[in-house]
Amino acid sequence: MANKDPKGVKVITRNRKAYHSYFVDETYEAGLMLVGSEVKSLREGKVQLTDAYARFERNELWLVKAHISPYSHATHENHDPERARKLLMHRRELRRLMGKTQEAGFTLIPLSLYFKDSKVKVELGLCRGKKLYDKREELRRKSHARDIERARRQYRG
């Protein structure tokens, strides 16, 4: 499942549902504080970001509802799959994000999870929610582009 980029980045998972449900205004990279069994589980690709989001608690940023399955070969000291995990960013970036998320309609959504030089990183998107008519318009646009491409291939072939 993992893709390898030439820059030493190995993608673990992408949150495709986030692009369907939100407009992504800006992206940020953050480190992730994990325990050993979580890292091993991530190497197996057993993670789900579908309902996950990031929130501030006491000037710290936490990743909430990200499901990392328990590692199959761990002992009884395995991790809780749905626990909140601390995100690591520079204080200046945290202050800026805190101000942005307090504005109406903005939230922090994890877009992808990846290994970068043996460290686990998460790409956070500063997002605004899409309305139903925005989602329909996007689906209509994609369908139209797909039909045009299909017709273009048939015309050449």
Image (cartoon, grey):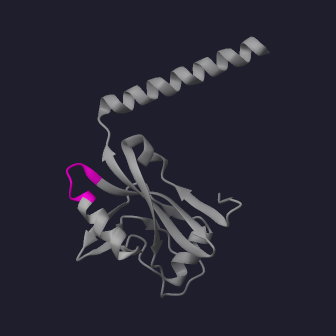
The reply to whether residue 71 is visible in this rendering is: no
Nearer to me, 69 or 114: 114
Vertical order, 144 against 75 (above or below): above
Q: Would residue 59 appear left or right of 116 to someone viewing this image? A: left
Nearer to me, 55 or 13: 55
Q: Residue at x 60, y 70 (%)?
A: 116
Position of residue 37 measured from the top left corner of the image (x, y, whole percent): 54, 80
Instruction: Inspect the magenta stretch and tell me whether residue 104 lies in it.
Output: yes
Q: Residue at x 39, y 26 (%)?
A: 137
Vertical order, 33 against 121 (above or below): below
Quadrant location of the N terminus? bottom right
Nearer to me, 145 or 26: 26
Position of residue 33 measured from the top left corner of the image (x, y, whole percent): 45, 79
The mark total stands at 0
Q: Would residue 42 appear left or right of 138 to someone viewing this image? A: right
Quadrant location of the C terminus? top right
Instruction: Inspect the magenta stretch and tell me whether residue 121 lies in it.
Output: no
Q: Residue at x 22, y 77 (%)?
A: 58
Q: Quadrant of residue 46?
A: bottom right
The reply to whether residue 36 is visible in this rendering is: yes
Which stretch appears magenta?
Answer: 100-106
Position of residue 88 measured from the top left corner of the image (x, y, whole percent): 41, 75
